Image (cartoon, rainbow, N blue to C red):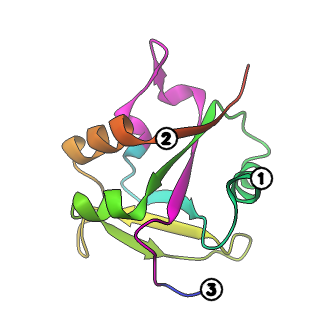
Amino acid sequence: MNDTFSPSEKLYRAVHETFWIDDRLSSACFKDKKGLSVNRSFENRDNEAIRQLENSFSTKPLKAIVSIRVHQCTDLLLKTKYLPEINNEFHSEIHQSESIISLSTGQAKKLAKSCVFEKYYLN
């Protein structure tokens, strides 16, 4: 795997109950001062990418898995970085820019409105 992202590549984000307000996704789901963690699809199909993400969060109950495409990040001038971890070769992060990690409130709101719900979990 390399650090080049295709514009149509999906980036998956696990969503926990804490990110739900009145049955809707909070934009806080896309805010993280350490870097917005996502899993890139690379060449995986949706079900393979979702299964890999589920395995990463087996100890925490999930509410949903959402996705955004790299071009949506590019349109918001966000920086997508491939940052594999020892136990997760698909781990990547979305940063506001090359030098600013956390997304702005406006950027987080736009991602929350434009993300696709890939899978819901009933609790």
Q: Quadrant of residue 52?
A: bottom right
Residue identified by numbered label 1: 51
Residue at 24 percent of width and 47 percent of height: 107
Instruction: Indicate whether residue 77 is drawn in magenta.
Output: no
Q: Is residue 114 above or below residue 34?
A: above
Label 2 with label 1: CB-CB less than 8 Å = no
Measured in 3D between alpha carbons, the distance from the residue under mark 2 to the one under mark 1, in whole angstroms, is 17 Å
Task: Point out the stretch of residues depicted in magenta.
Answer: 4-29
Residue at 43 percent of width and 42 percent of height: 115
- Residue 93 location, x and y as percent? 45, 65
Q: Secondary structure at mark 1?
A: helix
Q: Quadrant of residue 86?
A: bottom right
Which three-letter amino acid code belongs to the residue tagged 2? Val
Which three-letter amino acid code belongs to the residue tagged 3? Met
Q: Residues within 10 Å of mark 1 (few under 14, many from 20)?
A: few
Residue identified by numbered label 3: 1
